[in-house]
Image (cartoon, coloured by chain):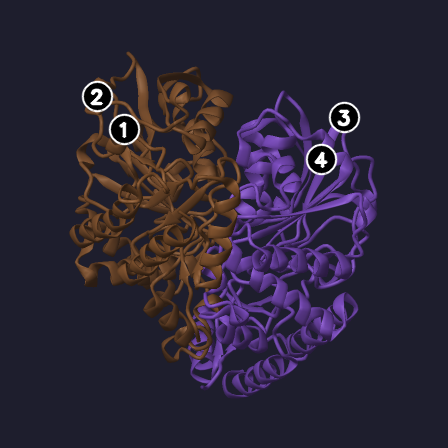
Chain colours: A purple, B brown
Amino acid sequence: MRRLHNFSAGPCTLPLEVLETAQRELVDYHGAGMSLLEMSHRTPPVEGVRDAAEAALRRLLGLGEHHHVAFVAGGATFQFAMLAMNFLTNGRLGDYTHSGAWAKKAIADGRKIGRVNVVWDGTPDDYMTLPDPASVSSSAGSQFLHLTSNETIGGVQWKSFPACEAPLVADMSSDFLSRPVPLERFGLIYAGAQKNIGPAGVTVVILTDDMLAACDGDLPGYLNYGGHVQNRSMLNTPPVFQIYMVKLVLEWLEARGGLAWAEQAAAERSGILYGVLGGSDGFYRCPVDERYRSTMNVVFRLPSEELEKRFVAEAEAAGLSGLKGHRSVGGIRASIYNAMPVAGVEALAGFMSDFRDRNG
Amino acid sequence: MRRLHNFSAGPCTLPLEVLETAQRELVDYHGAGMSLLEMSHRTPPVEGVRDAAEAALRRLLGLGEHHHVAFVAGGATFQFAMLAMNFLTNGRLGDYTHSGAWAKKAIADGRKIGRVNVVWDGTPDDYMTLPDPASVSSSAGSQFLHLTSNETIGGVQWKSFPACEAPLVADMSSDFLSRPVPLERFGLIYAGAQKNIGPAGVTVVILTDDMLAACDGDLPGYLNYGGHVQNRSMLNTPPVFQIYMVKLVLEWLEARGGLAWAEQAAAERSGILYGVLGGSDGFYRCPVDERYRSTMNVVFRLPSEELEKRFVAEAEAAGLSGLKGHRSVGGIRASIYNAMPVAGVEALAGFMSDFRDRNG
């Protein structure tokens, strides 16, 4: 097999060892005489996978007894709705920061259910920067202050976080477990798996005792955070395959050195690419404010759309896949999550230098 | 590998060929240089899988242009909420039949959102029977009449369906694609995958033009049926692995002969087991009204709980797995979905006869 370097924004590259383990175990799980996919979720092997996934997550983040974990189906898009329904019903207020495409969706769903205050709006700058966290504060009576820790499309990333009155709620889908975070400021964190921790189809939700106590208790069953937490992600049949894959990826991450390793590796990978951009005499141009450039999604432009098209096509032919920017903004985007080997980034950097030499 | 006969109620046995195909293709999908799990959902291979799954479903059921299909994450439990939110907001009314554990959950969620009329209630008979469909009618102004086509726990199954004013809405999770259904009476059908069509983590929703037009248009994004339909199940990143598995299972079903084959095979499998029960001189006792006995979940009791315990343990040792009844009702349950080979049922029947000889 010739394995491509996959720079897709998500779903995205997974650790090859994890895929190989999943392949080996798929038909007959640990000699059980059946696939894990065929087992009742109320059996020790499936409960064991769930327990191991949660335990690895707790070790990686250092979660204590006042933090609760749930694996919920439906992606971050479903969390936009679930969050609003749990905390903004009955006229309650939520603060949101508007940092780009994903924040916008979270805000829209908040407005469908409750009162929303946009405390910072990146629209005037085309979402190419973020506020100084020290300048961000929450409104009186707000249930939370929502932020999108990394905007996958825009390529902007919060480097540190506000310390405000209301608990922070963060959509960490695209940089989850790529660095340590000041957990004590966050009331709720959610992250779709399909960037740093597994395939699409499950979302990790972490929330505190206080947030759990503030949930609307009168929602239909599946919409209640409380039900998922109390039933330890088995309120109903969960997406077992994804939880299993998350377990494998988290264990892979731990073996590498956890969040400290992830942070260092992300800095190395993104440093290589931003270095190429900076040293290209303006051939490659990153539109993002230098202070908030993402370590996960490196976005850049070429001198013309014509050249961008050629760049993507030639890169693909050279085994560098998924580099086309999001359809809403164009340009190039290299997504370099935890599972992207440095060798992949080096191959891309080499291609970029060569492409510039030929076209600059 | 020694493959067990798996009588689990769901997740449950899958066709071995499907598991083997998935295993073969898991790391490098059709020579693409990456796994299907690593591909952006906006790429031809993933869109192709979605298209093929939907096309197979349309062929199997004979769906035309006035029927819409969506693959939604979250299971039937999420559909209880989504259904109520789309059709019962603003004081609207829904009719429900109460046939057991699953119907009860659907009703509870309906009541959280709108007005609910329980038009038939099986509580007095402990959910061991169903109404004559001809006797069931809908209330004036009702948005739908909801039924659970097969109760996985109770083992009761609608053999034919009401023809009433309101469109039928059915939770078909546990007998979906096991027989032809009079499609023209149904406004909406939903089915969690993890019985007849794949692993847990995706739900198929089929709805008509009329139902789509009646949806509440003011819900948060993920909760709108319309958004899922308009985006052809890619409103957000869908559970790609499950849609892929559904595709493989549906193609497997088509190759066997589709719904006509499924119906005949279900009759054969369940006929063997009900035959053993009936011929056991009362040693095995099926509590379900003969007219409504499920072809998917055969439930029965033994003379004592002590014997039931021994039955389950000895069956397990004989390679017959997952026979313990649901914790809420006890007894024995043999779930025999589409992918259960007749040989599995014959092995169980042989064990049952032998067990009775030794303990009767």
The answer to whether residue B265 of the structure is visible from this angle is yes
Say whether residue A29 is left or right of residue A226.
Answer: left
Marks 2/1: CA distance? Answer: 8 Å
- Place of residue A137 in the rendered image (x, y in percent of width and height, measured from the top left): 79, 37
Task: Give the numbered dot on residue B164.
Answer: 2
Amino acid on which disc 3 is placed = Gly
Residue A294 lies in quadrant: bottom right
Furthest toward the top, the residue is B140
Rendered image: mark on residue B168: 1
Residue B280 versus residue B130 in the image, above or below: below
In this rendering, do the residues under marks 3 and 4 share a single chain?
yes
Q: Give the CA distance from mark 2 to mark 4.
A: 43 Å
Q: Which mark is residue A212?
A: 4
Disc 1: host chain: B
**Could you tell whether B28 is left or right of A75 in the image?**
left
Q: CA distance from mark 4 to mark 1?
A: 37 Å
SS class, disc 3: loop
Q: Quadrant of residue A342?
A: bottom right
Amino acid type for the residue under numbered disc 1: Leu
Q: In the figure, B217 relative to B124: above or below?
A: below
Residue under the point 83% across and 43% down: A163
